Amino acid sequence: MQAEREEIMGLRAYLGLMRSLVIYYNPVRRVASNRFHARLLRRGDLAFDIGAHVGSRSRAMRAAGARVVACEPQEPFAGFLARSLPRDIVLRREAVGPSETMARMAVSSLHPTVSSLSTSFTGEAASAPGFGHVRWDRSQQVRMTTMDRLIADHGLPDYVKIDVEGFELDVLAGLSQPLPMLSVEYLPGFRDRTLAVIDRLEALGEYRFNPVLGERADFLWPEWQDAASARAFLAGLAPDAGSGDLYARLVSA
């Protein structure tokens, strides 16, 4: 029975990987992402991809000329990235959080983009819009580092993308200085988590914000807005609205 269960879990993980590759390596989406990141980054910039998944954003950052550090602990994605990423992208098969330790990740084999290190997130998701079909059917022990350690090892990044399914505030808990620019995924059904991220960023420095809806690869607002505008935007989203990314740029950057 154990061997059969492991075979089923392995098949689900493979199907989850294939599903993600089809979604995130869509040629139209890749062209749009490359164009967007070319506006976001300058050649020689340093970028961290926290929650790299299948590496589509890491590749877009690299295509813009950035030096890229990709962090992804989840299998089979970490293994896929180790085999497929260009050698000049640094891969760290680690999660990023508040401390350097070992942690346990709740994994959804068929929907691996929502695997999370946040136990409260997976608990709340059971009743959240859009998550009714998701099952966290296994777990994985992962090594965790901190943003401060990444900075000590690689330098202060010009841009950090954070997509970690409810664990964003924990990532920022391991950061002791403001970043020039970063983005976090927002989920309308979990807006309080993104509001807490805004609070954390304001404690680090003065930021301006701009959302990107879904995977549209373009800013919603023509001008960057203050934190009050970002909070109002999040408050105006219906719980079942689509996800997106909230970008934050340090005023003095």
Image (tube, helix red, strand yellow):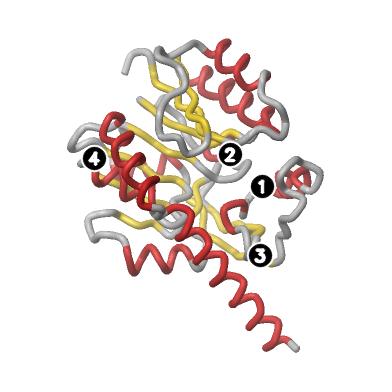
Where is residue 179? Give x, y as percent: 39, 27
Q: Badge 3: how crowded within 10 Å, few (<14), some, or many (20+)?
A: some
Q: Are marks 1 and 2 in contact (CB under 8 Å)?
A: yes
For the point 50% across and 28% down, the residue is 246
Left or right: 163 with respect to 232? left
89, 113: nearer the viewer: 113
Q: Are marks 2 and 4 in contact (CB under 8 Å)?
A: no
Mark positioned earlier in the residue sequence (2 or 4):
4
Mark positioned earlier in the residue sequence (4 or 3):
4
Query: In this figure, which residue is indicated by the disc labeled 1?
Result: 118
73, 236: nearer the viewer: 236
Going by the numbered disc 2, the residue's amino acid type is Asp
For the point 28% across and 29% down, the residue is 39
> SS at mark 2?
helix
Q: Which quadrant of the structure image shows residue 242?
A: top right
| Labels 2, 4: front one | 4
Mark positioned earlier in the residue sequence (1 or 2):
1
Going by the numbered disc 1, the residue's amino acid type is Ser
Query: In this figure, which residue is indicated by the disc labeled 2?
Result: 170
What is the spatial separation of the Cα atoms under label 2 and label 4, in whole angstroms? 28 Å
Mark positioned earlier in the residue sequence (3 or 1):
1
Query: In this figure, which residue is indicated by the disc labeled 3?
Result: 139
Q: Which quarter of the image is occupied by the N terminus?
A: bottom right
Q: Is residue 252 above or below residue 2?
A: above
What is the spatial separation of the Cα atoms under label 4 and label 3, in whole angstroms? 35 Å
Going by the numbered disc 3, the residue's amino acid type is Ser
| Labels 1, 4: front one | 4
| Labels 4, 3: front one | 4
For the point 50% across and 66% down, the residue is 18
| Labels 3, 2: front one | 3
Q: Badge 1: how crowded within 10 Å, few (<14), some, or many (20+)?
A: some
